[in-house]
């Protein structure tokens, strides 16, 4: 299903929305920070991004996998999570809109978290109009159409009944399950190696067709790039990791000069 809504109406009701006279300010895009308490340098980089880098933004878009895992909004009772939500909420207080899309790891982020973070949830995919350009935003996992096992899991995990059942189970049980799933996917952390885990040209072409746009911005693959595709330009966001090996991270911004990639400052 394609979702497209004028952003201003999506943004209505955000704290601070009334005091945003900055139509010409840039939009910032990030994804795949995989935040957890275990990666303090990456967390510090996110804090700097929200407090300092984002100061000049009209809107910040987080296109999925902000958190390494999410087992329900009762995680807000964890001091680390509460601190991240409060940090993000400062954007709304400063008149900067925050939009949040689910990733494959944090697709259970719910209304309570959105409220605590002052964020507006965006469906995937979502088309925005920014500086005259229509841009399709997606996390990117649904474009990996060669990974049939994952797509099966995705269909199951996005099913409302399965989610209700999971969320109704005890916190400790959910925590243990998340831990097991994470240790099973260790070594996955850096970048997926097999082409099976990258987007496919079929998946990309279908999204261009479905949205009628000629620009796609997505994350998920941890292969930051700008690809010239038959259907248009496809920008891939970097993942962030400043705690293991060579630091990685960065963001895209769009202003009157178009889309550009920036390293973390
Ligand atoms: Mn992902």
Image (spheres, helix red, strand yellow):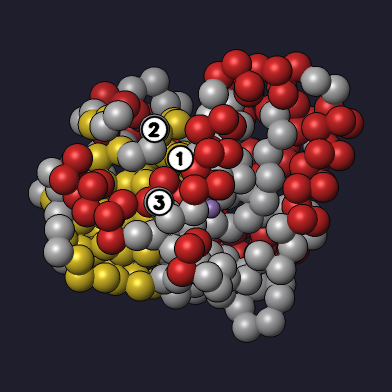
> Is there a contact, CB below 8 Å, between mark 3 and mark 1?
no
| Residue 134 relative to residue 242: left or right | left
Residue 198 placement (x, y as % from top left): 44, 63
User: Residue at (63%, 22%) from the top-left corner?
Assistant: 162
Q: x, y (%) of residue 148?
A: 49, 48
- Between disc 3 and disc 1, the foreground one is 3
- Which of the 4 image quarters holds residue 244? bottom right
Which sits in the foreground, 128 or 187?
A: 187
Q: Mark 1 near mark 2, Cβ–Cβ under 8 Å?
A: yes
Chain-order first, disc 2 or disc 3: 2
Q: Distance between the residues labelled 2 and 3?
A: 19 Å
Judging from the image, what secondary structure is the residue with disc 3 in?
loop
Please tell me which residue is depicted at 58% across the width and 58% down the height of the picture.
33
The tag earlier along the polypeptide, 3 or 1, is 1
Name the residue carrying label 1.
101
Which residue corresponds to mark 3?
A: 145
Asked whether residue 55 appears in the rendered view, the answer is no
């Amino acid at each position: 299903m394609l979702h497209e809504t004028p952003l201003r109406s999506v943004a209505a009701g955000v704290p601070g929305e009334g005091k945003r006279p900055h139509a010409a300010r840039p939009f910032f895009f990030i994804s795949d920070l995989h935040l957890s308490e275990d990666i303090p340098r990456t967390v510090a980089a996110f804090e700097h991004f929200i407090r300092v880098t984002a100061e000049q933004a009209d809107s910040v878009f987080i296109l999925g996998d902000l958190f390494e895992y999410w087992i329900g909004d009762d995680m807000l009772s964890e001091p680390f999570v509460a601190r991240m939500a409060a940090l993000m909420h400062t954007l709304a207080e400063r008149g900067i809109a925050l939009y949040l899309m689910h990733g494959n790891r944090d697709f259970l982020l719910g209304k309570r978290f959105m409220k605590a973070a002052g964020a507006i949830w965006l469906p995937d995919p979502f088309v925005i109009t920014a500086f005259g350009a229509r841009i399709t935003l997606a996390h990117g996992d649904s474009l990996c159409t060669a990974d049939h096992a994952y797509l099966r899991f995705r269909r199951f995990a996005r099913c409302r009944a399965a989610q209700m059942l999971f969320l109704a189970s005890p916190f400790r049980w959910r925590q243990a399950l998340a831990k097991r799933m994470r240790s099973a996917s260790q070594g996955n952390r850096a970048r997926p190696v097999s082409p099976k885990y990258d987007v496919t040209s079929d998946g990309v072409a279908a999204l261009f067709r479905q949205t009628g746009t000629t620009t796609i911005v997505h994350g998920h693959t941890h292969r930051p790039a700008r690809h010239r595709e038959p259907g248009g330009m496809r920008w891939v966001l970097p993942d962030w990791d400043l705690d293991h090996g060579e630091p990685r991270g960065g963001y895209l911004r769009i202003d009157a000069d178009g889309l550009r990639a920036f390293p973390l400052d």
